[in-house]
Amino acid sequence: MIRIILIIISLYFTMSSFWVESASLKVSPAQLIIHNVSPGHLYNIYKATNIRLTIYNDESYDQTWKLRIKKPQDKSDTWEKGYNKIPDTSWCYFESNEITVKAKSKGFAHMFVNIPDEEKFYNQHWVAIICVDGAVGSGISLAVDVRVLIETVSKASINNRPYGLLGIAPSMLTFDIRVGETVVSDVTLYNNDANSHTYSIHSLFDESYEDLSNNRNRYLSYSYLPIPETDWIKYPKQFRIEKNQIAKKEISISIPGHVEQPNSKFEDILLIQSDQATLGFIRIRINNLNRGE
Amino acid sequence: MKLFKSVFSLAICMLTIAATSVWGAETATISVTVSLESVIAVSVEPNNWAINMITLGSSTEPQDFTATIGNTATKIEIKASNANSGWVLSDIPAQDSFNVSILDPDLDLSTVYQELGGSIPAYGQKNFSMVYTAPVSDTKGGGVDQSFNVTLKASAP
């Protein structure tokens, strides 16, 4: 006897109790960088910066979305090179983990950031992912991931080793420099790994570095332009640091006689790679090219 | 003299508080840079899939779907869940194991996200067809809810 079982399966969109033809999810911003976060301080990001997550509901029915923060996954997620996974996702959270957005309306979610008050958490570049998705159930549902890049306060003078396989202090160099001048700064690199490594540095905006050609501008801070000529900045291209040792490296910047857009502010990102992976970067800011004129 | 001692003590106390705050966490003014692509969006049409009656071991006809994205290049990923009453999502249909496949790209859905479109241009679309294959045999019995969930996820590529 041929046994036949008839089954009936219907997938309906989970957010709706009635039959509808389409579903949509729209979230803004698509990505954000939070600069200059101090360990030991609780930030209400909306109060501090006026930025919050906006979820638009273009449908004619109410929709409920869940919000959570996760670490990116190596196999499935992509993110900006040089940012490392945030050590603990509980350091970022929303005032509510669920939001219901009325039909043809929009809702707002307010994020908080609270990095523990430990010196090792200065000079960090971290990535976390805000997941916006529907309730678990049966049906066809939608989700959006928003990457949050968190940069803690850059600090040159520290007493303890920075967190991570490669510590960088300071993590950002700001040069107030006039055309024709040369300025030099030091950066200390900490190999916190149990193995020695060879490191290399290169500029994200070097045209020969095509790996990130589509994503370079995502690193730039608000109001900064990419550095016009990457050879303004000199740095050691390759060096070795023994296990658990530190190395001080010199970074110098010279601005040539002629600069297009001399009133602009420029940024460069110096990516630091070990022989195994990209581990971090130094953010370079160049201000006031026409200072005193 | 008592008044002098009180004022002196108060001054020491205030100095101590001031010194403590100097050694506490430094509070900087944060700023936020939002991406130039300020909105990330995804929609799917239709947003339902009525599989209806199907015999064990057989497959549905392909059901067409269209995912549409917003004003920025977007990566679309897809995953499915196990069924509500014990059937398990699998690459190969088996006893109590069902399969959901996509024809282009050639994918067997799993419970972890897989790429449906790596970098779909702004305002672009991704058309795809899904096929459901029922388990070859069943131990859960008829008349139970074996529906499941399919999720489409959008993110910056």
Image: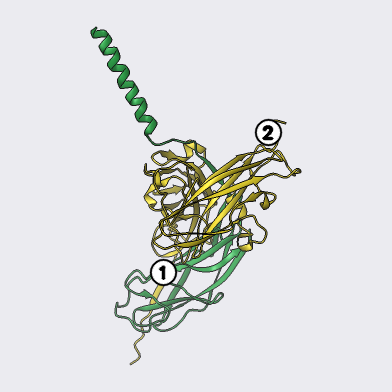
Chain colours: A yellow, B green
Q: What is the chain letter for disc 2?
A: A
Q: Residue at x 49, y 65 (%)?
A: A276
Instruction: Please tell me whether mark 2 sits on a helix, a strand or a loop.
Output: loop
The answer to whether residue B71 of the structure is visible from this angle is: no
Q: Position of residue B110 (x, y in %)?
A: 43, 72
Furthest residue in direction left, as rendered: B2
Mark-to-mark CA distance, 2 and 1: 57 Å
Q: Badge 2 is on which residue?
A: A291
Q: Amino acid at mark 2?
A: Arg
> Tag 1: Cα neighbours inside 10 Å, few (<14), some, or many (≥20)?
some
Q: Which mark is residue A51?
A: none
Is residue B121 rendered to the left or right of residue A53? right
Q: Position of residue A266 (x, y in %)?
A: 65, 44
From the viewer's side, name the closer residue of A98 and A226: A226
Quadrant assignment, res B103: bottom right
Quadrant assignment, res B6: top left
Is residue B16 rendered to the left or right of residue A210? left
Vertical placement of A134 versus A38: above or below?
below
Q: Nearer the viewer, mark 2 or mark 1?
A: 2
Q: Amino acid at mark 1?
A: Thr
Position of the C terminus of chain B by quadrant? bottom right
Check chain identity for marks 2 and 1: say if they share one: no
Furthest residue in direction bottom, as rendered: A1
The answer to whether residue A167 of the structure is visible from this angle is: yes
> Tag 2: Cα neighbours inside 10 Å, few (<14), some, or many (≥20)?
few
Instruction: Please tell me whether mark 1 sits on a helix, a strand or a loop.
Output: loop
Position of the N terminus of chain B by quadrant? top left
Q: Position of residue B79 (x, y in %)?
A: 45, 68
Q: Which mark is residue B111?
A: 1
